[in-house]
Image (spheres, rainbow, N blue to C red):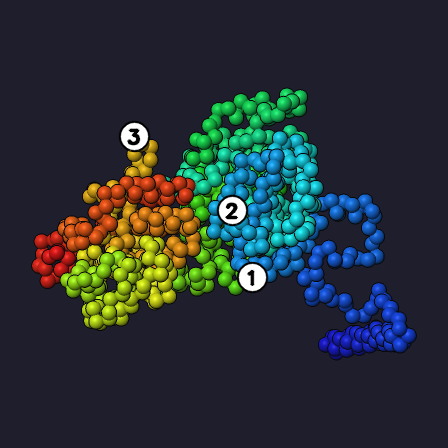
């Protein structure tokens, strides 16, 4: 038997070799004959292409860089009818092959940076409130330019949000109006915003005019029509969505376990016929009336009774029993099924309510999917597997549910709570595409504080920001730079500024001292400054304005900055203790003089107080430590209008810095121990020269508070009652057991 097996194997191997040589020889002769024909043709000036050519035809490596309108048909053997050509030309996806490399002119951006131009509004053109909010957000951003020659991106003033022909907001003759714009250039470097497209009954994604090579920032866009790395998927938001600020998320505290009264809820319309009706019509199969409450109603539209089915009356009765807001705030998961279009208002409502969205909209390109990892905040379901949804969400561990809910709150407040944030996120995504070498990574977009507050122009290394030390396994900085803001001339060796300089220089954590000379008098001679163990650098302010104290000076070599007013009185021990506290909270302001804000019901405005109370919401930068990134953010993120106000008043720069840091961190500053007479001592040293002696000082600060709150769209400051003291502070034990013993003696 073994011999027979060996003979059989040898026979099989021989047969395979014969067949291999036979067929290989045929192909070799065919390719040789083909090459001879090509040589013969080339000698006669001819070139033939054979369909059964031996070598595969690879695509041209440079093809993506060819403009889409110059690309040839992939299959020349398939004829295109005139009707197909007309349909292709009228489609919004005529430029479906558009990518940044092929349909965007990068040279405009590299010349002047990322600047956005909004066309001036044409006379007689109506603009819906939602689109006005979009344009206002662009014009109020740091990207805006009124000079089209400086622009990198162009936005139409023509309202393109609602392209449903049955809508009263529909703009007619948009095709001719767009084509008449002298900067249109077939849509190149243009961005078009759209919320609604198509109309009854099929609700296609056609916006009704040729967008050419323009990018789409579109809601309810499908993955089939979405052009990756070119279009931007935005959320569907209502006309009542706030322009700036927006409400905070509804997750006020973390409940453990993170389960609510209802496991899964939905309340909305049910479509009896047409697109989007299948999923919502099937929801009653999952509804149990206990912890899974999925309610639909047929009662919408003018002639709903003509089309109602046998379930309509029962559904309508059940629908009226439940309050939508009560359900939303008491549910762990919220179903987000597609409607007539892929997107739904329920998506943003669920995010704000910390109700984990369960997506049932096959083919929907989720908002900002290019940068947001939705697996951290939502459950992506399948319309075809509706009956498996309850068992799937019941199997999710409580730890995962808590993480999902926390992420919904972060994403809501970072990118979706206002029209301004939606617009700025869109622009930042496009900017990252243009300047890829400094673009934000996924960690920045999906971790606090988010992509809008982390400016990659500052640094491409995450360790240079105060928010990622734990993620990178880094320790906070071990040294600080003291920046002393000097505004009065140096006339005596006993002035507080010199004592302050010596005290800061003696700190074991001090790397250097910078004196910002914003005084009208000339710089003092070098010998006027005391000798110190660390370098002292004196910088003369060019503009000599208040905002100059927060400029991102290259001379600041440490990440930590100790900001000091010239009349502040601090000991070395106080400086050391404040810095050790800051090392535990590197993203926050840590310091001594605290102030608070309040809402004045009689005047209906925000108020400012310096009274010593049990809580505070600001730590003044006259004696505070913070990360130097906030200098960059103050200079490049805040609008010129706020900084000009500060400079004109020569006041409020410390309040504005507190607003900024609280808006970024969503946390209050941290107050540390101080001596009892700190306030009186500080103000008494140079009372005549100090701005604190100005009677209009507090009135100006009240005005600043309200102006700043108006720009942010909400009040970012939050109160705290926490004060950090040294261990054994004021305890009745030996002073020798206390590390910061000198603080109690002051």
Residue 232: % across, % down: 58, 49
- Where residue 171 sits in the image (x, y, percent)? 64, 36
Q: Quadrant of the C terminus?
A: bottom left
Say if mark 2 contacts mark 1, CB within 8 Å.
no
In this view, the residue in front, 740 or 715, is 715
Side of 689 relative to 356 (left or right): left
On the image, the x and y values in percent for residue 718 come to: 32, 44
In the structure shown, which secondary structural element does the residue marked by tag 3 occupy? loop
How far apart are the two marked residues, 3 and 1, measured between alpha carbons? Answer: 52 Å
Residue under pointer 2: 138
Identify the residue under disc 1: 110
Asked if 479 appears above or below 709 in the picture, the reply is: below
Badge number at residue 602:
3
Upstream in sequence: badge 3 or badge 1: 1
Q: Residue at 16% across / 64% down in the picture?
A: 493
Per the image, label 2 sits on a secondary structure element best described as helix
Q: Quadrant of residue 179 in the image?
A: top right
């Amino acid at each position: 038997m073994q011999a027979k097996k060996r003979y059989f194997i040898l026979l099989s191997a021989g047969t395979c070799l014969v067949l291999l040589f036979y067929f290989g020889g045929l192909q070799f002769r065919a390719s040789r004959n083909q090459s001879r024909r090509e040589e013969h043709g080339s000698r006669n000036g001819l070139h033939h292409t054979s369909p059964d050519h031996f070598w595969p035809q690879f695509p041209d490596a440079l093809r993506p860089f060819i403009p889409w309108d110059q690309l040839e048909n992939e299959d020349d053997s398939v004829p295109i009818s005139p009707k197909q050509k007309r349909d292709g030309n009228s489609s919004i996806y005529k430029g479906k092959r558009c990518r940044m490399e092929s349909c965007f002119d990068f040279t405009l951006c590299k010349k002047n940076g990322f600047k956005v131009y909004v066309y001036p509004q044409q006379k007689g053109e109506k603009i819906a409130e939602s689109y006005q909010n979009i344009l206002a957000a662009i014009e109020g951003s740091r990207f805006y330019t009124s000079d089209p020659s400086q622009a990198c991106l162009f936005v139409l003033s023509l309202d393109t949000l609602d392209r449903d022909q049955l809508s009263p907001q529909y703009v007619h003759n948009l095709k001719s109006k767009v084509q008449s714009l002298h900067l249109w250039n077939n849509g190149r470097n243009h961005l078009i915003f759209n919320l609604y497209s198509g109309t009854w009954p099929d609700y296609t994604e056609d916006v009704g005019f040729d967008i050419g090579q323009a990018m789409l920032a579109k809601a309810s866009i499908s993955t089939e029509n979405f052009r990756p790395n070119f279009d931007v998927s935005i959320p569907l938001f209502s006309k009542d969505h706030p322009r700036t600020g927006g409400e905070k998320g509804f997750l006020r505290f973390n409940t453990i376990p993170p389960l609510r009264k209802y496991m899964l809820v939905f309340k909305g319309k049910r479509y009896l016929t047409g697109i989007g009706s299948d999923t919502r019509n099937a929801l009653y199969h999952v509804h149990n009336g206990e912890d899974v409450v999925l309610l639909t109603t047929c009662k919408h539209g003018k002639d709903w009774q003509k089309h109602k089915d046998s379930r309509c009356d029962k559904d309508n009765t059940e629908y009226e029993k439940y309050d939508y807001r009560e359900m939303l705030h008491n549910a762990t998961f919220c179903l987000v099924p597609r409607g007539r279009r892929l997107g739904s208002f329920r998506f943003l409502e669920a995010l704000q309510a910390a109700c984990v969205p369960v997506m049932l909209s096959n083919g929907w390109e989720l908002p900002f999917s290019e940068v947001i990892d939705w697996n951290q905040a939502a459950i992506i379901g399948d319309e075809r597997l509706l009956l498996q949804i309850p068992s799937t969400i019941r199997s999710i561990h409580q730890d995962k549910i808590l993480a999902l809910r926390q992420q919904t709150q972060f994403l809501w407040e970072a990118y979706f709570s206002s029209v301004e944030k939606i617009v700025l996120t869109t622009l930042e995504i496009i900017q990252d595409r243009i300047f890829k070498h400094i673009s934000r990574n996924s960690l920045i977009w999906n971790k606090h504080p988010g992509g809008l507050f982390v400016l990659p122009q500052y640094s491409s290394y995450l360790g240079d920001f105060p928010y990622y030390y734990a993620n990178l396994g880094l320790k906070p900085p071990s040294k600080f730079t003291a920046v002393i803001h000097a505004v009065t001339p140096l006339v005596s060796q006993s002035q507080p500024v010199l004592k302050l300089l010596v005290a800061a220089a003696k700190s074991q954590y001090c790397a250097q001292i910078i004196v910002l000379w914003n005084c009208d008098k000339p710089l003092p001679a070098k010998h006027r400054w005391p000798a110190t163990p660390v370098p002292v650098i004196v910088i003369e302010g060019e503009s000599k304005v208040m905002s100059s104290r927060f400029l991102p000076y290259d001379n600041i070599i440490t990440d930590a900055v100790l900001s000091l007013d010239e009349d502040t009185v601090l000991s070395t021990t106080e400086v050391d203790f404040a810095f050790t506290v800051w090392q535990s909270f590197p993203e926050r302001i840590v310091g001594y003089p605290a102030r608070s804000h309040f809402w004045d019901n009689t005047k209906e405005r925000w108020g400012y107080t310096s009274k010593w109370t049990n809580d505070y919401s600001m730590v003044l930068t006259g004696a505070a430590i913070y990360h130097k990134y906030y200098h960059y953010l103050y200079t490049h993120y805040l609008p010129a209008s706020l900084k000009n106000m500060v400079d004109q008043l020569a006041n409020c720069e410390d309040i504005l810095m507190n607003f900024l840091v609280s808006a970024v961190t969503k946390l209050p500053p941290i107050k540390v121990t101080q001596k009892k007479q700190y306030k009186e001592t500080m103000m008494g040293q140079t009372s005549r020269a100090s701005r604190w002696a100005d009677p209009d000082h507090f009135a100006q600060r009240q005005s600043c508070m309200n102006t700043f709150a108006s720009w942010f769209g909400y009040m970012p400051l939050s109160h705290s009652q926490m004060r950090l003291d040294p261990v054994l502070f004021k305890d009745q034990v030996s002073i020798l057991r206390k590390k910061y013993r000198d603080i109690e003696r002051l």
